[in-house]
Amino acid sequence: TLFADASYELGRSFIHVV
């Protein structure tokens, strides 16, 4: 779950940056 959460947060951050 921790890895999934990190991946999700990373994805959101990337989308936010874009």
Image: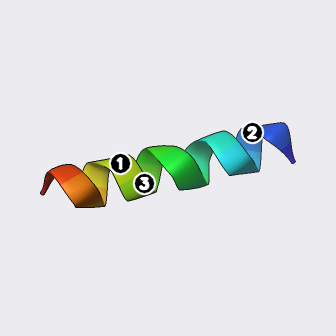
Whether pointer 3 and pointer 1 mark residues with C-beta atoms closer than 8 Å, the reply is: yes
Say whether residue 3 is left or right of residue 10: right
Residue on which the image places disc 2: 3
Q: CB of mark 1 within 8 Å of CB of mark 2?
A: no
Q: Residue furthest right?
A: 1
Q: Nearer the viewer, mark 1 or mark 2?
A: 1
Left or right side of 11 for 17:
left
Q: How crowded is mark 1: few (under 14 residues within 10 Å), some or many (20 or more)?
A: few
- Secondary structure of the residue carrying tag 1 is helix
- Residue at image position (73%, 50%) is 4
Q: What element carries label 3?
A: helix
Residue drawn 17% across the image and 50% down it: 17
Task: Point out the tag, 3 or 2, that comes first from the N-terminus.
Answer: 2
In this rendering, is residue 6 above or below 8?
above
For the point 87% across and 48% down, which residue is it?
1
Q: In this view, does 13 lie to the left or right of 8?
A: left
- Which residue is label 3 attached to? 11
Of mark 1 and mark 2, the one earlier in the sequence is: 2
Name the residue type under label 3: Gly
Looking at numbered disc 1 in the image, what kind of residue is underneath it? Ser
Q: What element carries label 2?
A: helix
Which x, y percent locates residue 13?
35, 48
Q: Distance between the residues labelled 3 and 2?
A: 12 Å
Q: Which mark is residue 13?
A: 1
- Residue at 53 percent of width and 49 percent of height: 9
Q: Position of residue 14 (x, y in %)?
A: 29, 49
Q: Against 17, is 15 above or below?
A: below
Q: Which quadrant would the C terminus be assigned to in this image? A: bottom left
